Image: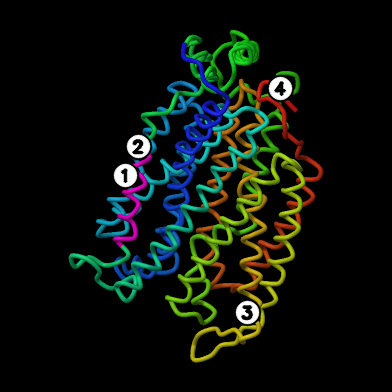
Amino acid sequence: MPTYSDSQRSLIVFLTCCVAAIGGFLFGFDSGVINGTVDGLQSSFNSDSVGTGFNVASMLLGCAVGAFFAGRLADKYGRRTLLLVAAVFFIVSAWGSGIADGSLEFVIYRILGGLAVGAASVMAPAYISEIAPAHLRGRLATIQQVAIISGLFFSFLNNYILANLAGGSTSELWFGVTAWRWMFWMELIPAGIFLIALLFIPESPRYLVSARRDERAERVLHMIYNESDAKERLAQIRDSLSEQRKPRFSDLINPKTGKVLSLVWVGIGLAVFQQLVGINVVFYYGAVLWQAVGFSEGDALLINVISGAVSIAACLGAIALIDRIGRKPLLWGGSLGMAVTLAILVYAFSTAEMVDGSLQLSDSNGVLALIAANAYVFFFNSSWGPVMWVMLGEMFPNQVRGSGLAVAGLFQWVANFAITMTFPIMLASIGLTGAYGFYAICAVISIFFVIKFVRETNGRELEDMAYV
């Protein structure tokens, strides 16, 4: 068995986690690219507000299914195997979304992409958590959120550049094809890189032990730990799995009470509140939102790029803090910041006036809305954005990790679908003020949820996670 120096082991762990996190980049790119294509979808498919909402949100149906089944399939076939399947689905979806001639065809390809996003959303952080040593796990798992936000940023930048080159998202770009279709096709590049890179990383040692492949698991652990620590970690994994039966969903039920484990409800709460604060309205409908209060399409797409850059900076801040101050302080602090900035947005949007058939903000309130919106994005991506995925990847004991992730992931994407689908309807019925007022209330509630129900996981080995 080859020997590795400490620096080599650190580099192997870092690069392996980066490869897994490309799934997060594609998650972000696939989620954000739709932002710049809404006008193209409306004009090409002649869809109304409800139809447009479904075209945008359809991917999330696939996300819910992908997230729900990914954990169980990964327990059976392996984490890396599921990520490879997801990479193929990303490629098919990116190509198909760009060639679609109607809503039905488009929705089918987007759902395929959603299956990939859902699988990557739960498998990438789980894989990273199972590869990373405990003292580095928070920072390495946060790479996933940096990747997601980087994917969003580059999708926004991609949309902005292509729309500018063509003169608009619905204008022809290269080879007589409209710009919004090229926005989808650009995803083929990172998706192809992801597929190839996955062939060079190892399988999760915890999966290998559960699959009775202890020799391979030990080889992987030797790439991460020194010889004595690798043997000790292997023994700990064996003990935690304790020659037990295959994981199953019934493990989520407390045998003494017959009720769902409280830990599962906490995971569901984390997953749902991450969406109820409305962040994906900014990611999916940012261009629509800013055009609704008087900005041009070009300016709205540029604002998205700025928000993406702010998000990356916020994630880097989270990486610096998550293993120092812990997960829980970041969560409630982020909730507090989002509640305040959302309240400011509600005020700014409430002052908008109708001018020539469209809403307009005054110059001062337009600046206030921009600052508040980017502050809101900053608070989210320095807290709930990365921390929720970190906690879902590490808070469940080994026996229920796959099933727990499946259930929490399902609720996360169902909530995402509900928020995304209802935004155009809320915009038409109660306006931006009402919609953002709802998101602000949810942010306030999430503060109390974190303080009362969430337990700190910082610095604990995965084998030490308890059924609480």
Look at the magenta stretch and give its main secondary structure: helix
Residue 442, given in percent of the width and then of the height, sits at 70, 57
In terms of sequence position, does the residue under pointer 3 or pointer 1 come before the other?
A: 1
**Circle number at residue 367:** 3
Q: Give the side of residue 317 with respect to residue 328, left or right.
A: left
Inter-mark Cα distance, 3 to 1: 39 Å
**Image coordinates for residue 55, horizontal then vertical, percent:** 40, 58
Residue, disc 4:
464
Q: Is residue 465 magenta-colored?
A: no
Q: Is residue 442 left or right of residue 425?
A: right
Asked if the residue at tag 1 contacts the one at tag 2, i.e. Cβ–Cβ closer than 8 Å, the answer is yes
Q: Which residue is mark 1?
A: 91
Residue type at mark 2? Leu
With 69 as the anchor, is 101 left or right in this view?
left
Q: Nearer the viewer, mark 3 or mark 1?
A: 3
Q: Which residue is mark 2?
A: 195
Say which amino acid is labelled 1.
Ile
Residue 403 falls in image quadrant: top right
Which residue shows up at 55% across the image and 20% down it? 206
Judging from the image, what secondary structure is the residue with disc 1 in? Answer: helix
Where is residue 33? Give x, y as percent: 41, 58
Res. 108 in view: no
Residue 192 part of the magenta segment: yes
The residue lying toward the viewer, choosing from 248 and 157, is 157
The local secondary structure at tag 2 comes to: helix
Q: CA distance from mark 4 to mark 3?
A: 48 Å
Q: Which residues are magenta?
A: 181-194
